[in-house]
Amino acid sequence: MTRAGLIGGALFLVLTALWLVLAVPPGPRAAYEAWFIALVLVGTRLPGPANQVTLARAYLAVPGLVYGLQPGGLGALAVTVALASLTDLLDGTVARRFAQPSNLGGALDPVVDGIFFGAVAAGLALGGAYPIWLALVVVLRYLLPALVGGVLVLAGRRPALTHTLFGQLSTSLIAVLLGWVALFRGLGQDASLVVVAAAVVIPVSTLLVFANLAWANRAALRGVEAASGG
């Protein structure tokens, strides 16, 4: 266990307990507690404060899913997306501040992005605010690179753990578009134009991400070990 992980775990336990008491989410409370405790156990093994900031998005995935399912919770969902976006900006800053950028942080970042944005998209889709097929595109945007990266590692090849231009752009666009859908719906405004924009922008940006990642990992995909980045 790490010092940062123990401190972060204690803080997240308090915050998640407060959320469970104040928000009273639907369904069995034990399911929420199991997810949060699992994250705490994972977090205790992660070094450095930057990774704890990154892991916050995995905790926020549960409120993101719950608020997306509830028409009356879309305003709170917009705030949740904003908080998640803030952690995405802060984790790199914290890593540089403590001189701790690492391959682990580079690998963790897209995984928790996928968990968070996948949960938000699924909640919006199941709540009727978002097309189900588009929610699946959001999930695939993060799941496919993670699966390919895992296969490369198992095959003894080292994928390039770098933030790509289109990867960062795609995540920013997904955050903005999902947040806008939630905000518009929460304010009782018509979000149809935002959904139409998302239906065009998200699939296109996802294809660009896949192409960018394939190019960045062309050596590993060909069977030549690629140099990993921070």
Image (spheres, grey):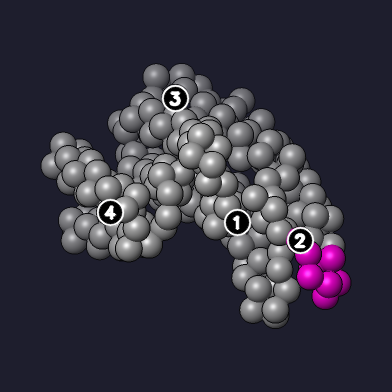
Residue at horizontal 62%, vertical 70%? 150
Q: Taking 230 as reference, is 180 above or below it? A: above
Image mark for residue 103: 1
Neighbour tally class for label 4: few under 14, some 14-19, many 20 plus, Cα within 10 Å:
some
* First of labels 1, 4 by sequence position: 4
Is residue 7 rendered to the left or right of residue 228?
left
The CA span between labels 1 and 4 is 21 Å
Name the residue tied to disc 3. 183
- Give the amino acid type for the residue marked by disc 3 in the picture: Leu
- Give the amino acid type for the residue marked by disc 4 in the picture: Leu
Please name which of the two marks, 4 or 3, marks the residue nearer to the observer. 4
- Give the amino acid type for the residue marked by disc 2 in the picture: Ala
Q: Position of residue 110 (x, y in %)?
A: 57, 51
Splitting the image into 4 quarters, where does residue 29 fall?
bottom left
Image mark for residue 6: 4
* First of labels 4, 3 by sequence position: 4
Please name which of the two marks, 3 or 1, marks the residue nearer to the observer. 1
* First of labels 3, 1 by sequence position: 1
- Does the magenta portion include 223? yes
The CA span between labels 2 and 1 is 11 Å
